[in-house]
Image (cartoon, rainbow, N blue to C red):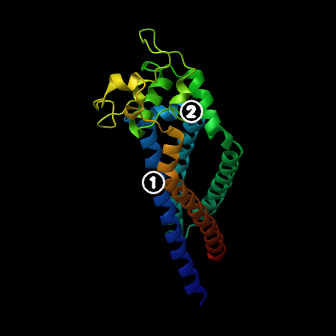
Amino acid sequence: MEGDCLSCMKYLMFLFNFFIFLGGACLLGLGIWVIVDPTGFREIVAANPLLFTGAYIMLAMGAMLFLLGFLGCCGAIRENKCLLLFFFMFILLIFLAELSAAILAFIFRENLTREFFTKELKKHYQRNNDTDVFSSTWNSVMITFACCGVNGPEDFEAIPHLPYSSLEKAIPEACCQRELQSREGMFVNKEACLSGMERFQNRQGCYTVILNSFETYVYLAGALAIGVLAIELFAMIFAMCLFRGIQ
């Protein structure tokens, strides 16, 4: 009976570590994609130090989980006490680090508020200056999501217009409607848009548009994070039980 219980524990340990291995591979792949993605998301990450740090943390965590899942599988199948002990200590550190990251994210959540982005936009945005990373990133976001500013076109009233513009409070070209939501897309009516005709402008703020677009994915990411923590906790329990059961 004891041998059957140990065998069952071994295969359960292997199963949990296999899930950790897959989770690590997903995080690793996602981290690499965020950092090297050529479609503009990399610029958004680079413009925000919090997101930039988070991307590299996700990459590091993915690599560690990938390695730990592999070591845990090997330790369970081969019944190696050294590998199991190493696995337990290492995954305990990762578990505590993830909890710390969650707490820090909660504490610094005010850095992702509507007011924060509005303040940064008015302070650093240079309209159609695509040589500036911040401005280029915002232009890409507004074109991709068919939105304008954080709250709407009124965000640009305090931002100086370009020298060659004859309009007192012209919105940037990125706020004008396009037939295709990309930089290569043709304007529906650029002149009418810049002259103030609202029906040729994207009037909705990007904060609301992006929040609505990613709301489902945020809940999914939260559910996955809880699932990963639960798997890690069970894996540590099984690792210690298997470690104690091996003669």
Q: SS of the residue at dot 1?
A: helix
| Residue 127 placement, left or right of 106 | left
Q: Is residue 208 above or below residue 47?
A: below
Q: Position of residue 30 (x, y in %)?
A: 45, 47
Q: Gap between marks 1 and 2, in whole Å?
A: 23 Å
Picture residue at 30% right of the left edge, 37% below the top: 180
Residue 112: quarter of image: top right
Q: Which mark is residue 209?
A: none
Query: Amino acid type of disc 1?
Result: Cys
Mark nearest the camera among 1 and 2 is: 2
Query: Amino acid type of disc 2?
Result: Asn
Name the residue nearer the viewer: 77 or 209. Answer: 209
Q: Which mark is residue 48?
A: 2
Q: Position of residue 66 (x, y in %)?
A: 49, 54
Q: Which mark is residue 26?
A: 1
Number of residues whose C-alpha sits closer than 10 Å to that of mark 2, classed few (under 14), some (14–19) or many (20 or more): few
Q: Residue furthest top?
A: 163
Q: SS of the residue at dot 2?
A: loop
Name the residue nearer the viewer: 113 or 238. Answer: 113
Number of residues whose C-alpha sits closer than 10 Å to that of mark 1, classed few (under 14), some (14–19) or many (20 or more): some
